Amino acid sequence: MADRSFPDGFLWGVATSAQQIEGGSSQGGRGESIWDRFAATPGRIADGSDARVACDHYHRWREDVGLLKWLGVGAYRFSIAWPRIVPGGRGAINASGLDFYDALVDALLAAGVLPFVTLNHWDLPQPLQDRGGWGARATAEAFVEYAGAVSARLGDRVRHWATHNEPWCIATLGHEQGEHAPGHRDPAEALRVAHHLLLSHGWAVETLRRAAPGAEVGIVLIVVPGWPARPSEADREAVRRFDGALNRWYLDPLFRGRYPADAIADRVRLGHLAGPDLPFVREGDLEAIATPLDFLGVNYYCRAVLRADAAGDPVAVPVTPEQEPTDMGWEVFPQGLHDVLVRLAREYRPAKIYVTENGAAYTDAADATGRIADLRRIEYIDSHLAQAHRAIAAGVPLGGYFAWSLLDNFEWARGYAMRFGLFDVDFATQRRRPRDSAHWYRRVVAAGAVDDLTQQPLLRRIP
């Protein structure tokens, strides 16, 4: 595997989030999150489930640290549950919540695993939502207070901090399309939400740096490359509009200190803004948002193939993929990861990039011996790692890769039907079992190199 080796110091990891795995939703002083409220609303979650127990990581975290140690990964990306630290959203700090993460961080370090902390992975405390949520500027202030409380406790040991995970999903899926918590359908509110998320990020960066001198501080974005369905000017224009709304609306403020003018014009045309002046932006906001980052986290799963509708706006087009889609219905398109990484490096020049999420949902039954031969997941991760390797060769400052996910989990509005884990979870018994992909990833991490899956004997040696 030497010809597909990654650089020395490359950080191999896996990722999870608190709402998706922890459970213990009413224990240890934890308050209600917007996802708790959303899941309790009939019809919101596809299978009618909720995350009150999830993977029971709140009680089984020692076992899960053991899984990380067995995998041999150098880092674990996890999120802090904001409602576990500040149940009321602002004000009193829940000491037992900080104790939980304090013990987790110590156990990770003892196992040789670096903690890579995300502060907000969508689980806003419900009391803040009741006071306007991310649509209110005060929530940005509350986030900085929360970041200060967590970093004051953990900043002496945590050397990697991400403020937010995928602010586009919070703003657009949660406030414009209504698919995620809190389930709103208000495009104007979604724009305010996006700005307050970015603003809270910029404000929190300095707070984190004061509490954790020398640590890396960044943010995690989902980046989706758009491809025209046809070689037409109309479809290329649709891709531009899509890219402006999903990618550049976040990248440009972070790295250029401004919102993209063409995307603003698109929103004015759609009636989401009254004019080109953004009413939610105050003096100094853009400078705060553009506070220099130590890294950019990139979540990549698939591309979007787009055609223009009658108004010229983008519409996703189903494609016939070379490989079958994942259980999420997403096309498997590894080249997109390379293209995204190269584009980000050339156009925005981040100091460092991490692939903070990449993985696939597949359901594979265990055989009579209990083995779960999930070859499709192995092929998915392998092919994307190969593209990450290409990106490094092209000069991208890629510092690490985090597979999504360590465990099967509560997959948001999809419930428990989507299986992303390297480890299978029986939610009735909470038994964890390594899939073949876990054995394979363990070997890749140990070698620091990507397998060549054309060498079929390698696969036959799993596990």
Image (tube, rainbow, N blue to C red):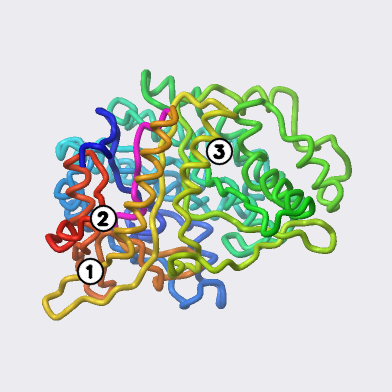
In the image, farthest residue toward the bottom: 368
Residue 218 part of the magenta-drawn span: no
Helix, strand or loop at label 3? It is: helix
Query: Which residue corresponds to the image point at 45% horizontal and 44% vertical from the top-left?
Result: 86
Instruction: State whether residue 78 is above or below residue 217.
Output: below
Do labels 2 and 3 touch, CB within 8 Å?
Answer: no
Q: Which sits in the foreground, 18 or 98?
A: 18
Which numbered disc, 2 or 1, marks the residue closer to the eye?
A: 2
Query: Which residue corresponds to the image point at 65% horizontal and 31% vertical from the top-left?
Result: 253
Query: Which residue corresponds to the image point at 75% horizontal and 29% vertical from the top-left?
Result: 282
Can you tell which mark lies on residue 156?
Answer: none
Which numbered disc, 2 or 3, marks the residue closer to the eye?
A: 2
Q: Amino acid at mark 2?
A: Leu
Q: Amino acid at mark 1?
A: Ala
Mark 1 — residue? 373
Q: Which sits in the foreground, 401 or 430?
A: 401
Mark 3 — residue? 142
211 sits to left or right of 246: left
Q: Which residues are magenta?
A: 397-406
Q: Quadrant of the C terminus?
A: bottom left
Q: CA distance from mark 1 to mark 3?
A: 46 Å
Which numbered disc, 1 or 3, marks the residue closer to the eye?
A: 1
Can you tell which mark lies on residue 453?
Answer: 2
Badge 2: residue crowd in 10 Å (few <14, some 14–19, many ≥20): few
Point out residue 388 in the picture as x, y percentages from the top left corner: 39, 41
Q: Amino acid at mark 3?
A: Ala
81 sits to left or right of 233: left
Instruction: State whether residue 417 is above or below residue 310.
Output: below
Point out residue 184 in the picture as x, y percentages from the top left corner: 67, 61
